[in-house]
Amino acid sequence: DAGVIQSPRHEVTEMGQEVTLRCKPISGHNSLFWYRQTMMRGLELLIYFNNNVPIDDSGMPEDRFSAKMPNASFSTLKIQPSEPRDSAVYFCASSGGGGALNTGELFFGEGSRLTVL
Amino acid sequence: AQSVTQLDSQVPVFEEAPVELRCNYSSSVSVYLFWYVQYPNQGLQLLLKYLSGSTLVKGINGFEAEFNKSQTSFHLRKPSVHISDTAEYFCAVSDNFNKFYFGSGTKLNVKP
């Protein structure tokens, strides 16, 4: 089975540019999470969706960040405009499914490493 | 809100020695507990989890953890580590499978 798929794996951009990160969750999972990992702050939850609906976006750092989930198999995290302090590894994770399908664990993608110059 | 404390940011250990990585959590409700491992340039993958039942949980790669409700701890152990266990380990807690709270991570460095 395919796991959580993220793209791009690496992105280098200049300050002020728009960045779009993409995620395809595991088929059948109904929850999707975006995390950011940095040396200074560790693993931070940015936003999570349940059944394609954003449930909690309190971790989104500021208005420059936005996330969408137009359908059950695709989500995007957009940063516009990007700043050097946004440099981090961004992880997408999925979980859940109805009833017994929900084993309670998160399945992570391999991450998108963003460098903003 | 929940919080998770991993007391050691780095743990150096020699190959074939035992290791314990400590994790404490704060919660007033029943929780589900997890340990994840992250190898360099990879995502996190599940090592083991406690949902209910026996407080001693066995996971992959020979790891085990014990849930101690009175001490609100979920320490990870392995009786004999290998070089390949070098990685960062994260403890996580959730009360409803919707929000997961992660600790700051412990880097395990296994030396030959």
Image (cartoon, rainbow, N blue to C red):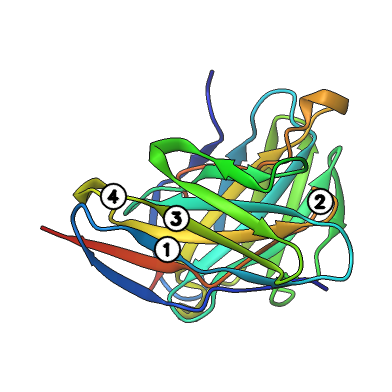
Q: State the residue at coordinates (58%, 69%).
A: B103
Which residue has dot 1 on it?
A: B20
Q: Can residue A67 be seen in this snapshot?
A: yes
Residue A50 position, x and y percent, is 85, 43
Q: Can residue A117 be seen in this view?
A: no
Give the chain of mark 2. B
For the residue marked with disc 2, what is the amino acid?
Answer: Asn
Q: Is B81 on the left-hand or right-hand side of A110? A: left
Q: Mark 1 lies on which chain?
A: B
Disc 3 from disc 4: Cα separation: 9 Å
Q: Which of B47 and A55 is in front in this view?
A: B47
Q: Name the residue under label 2.
A: B98
Q: Is residue B45 above or below residue A55?
A: above
Name which residue lies at 35% across and 74% down: B10
On the same chain, marks 3 and 1? The answer is yes
Measured as percent of width and height from the top left, residue A44 is found at 62, 68
Q: Mark 1 and mark 3 in contact (Cβ < 8 Å)? A: yes
Q: Under tag 2, what secondary structure?
A: loop
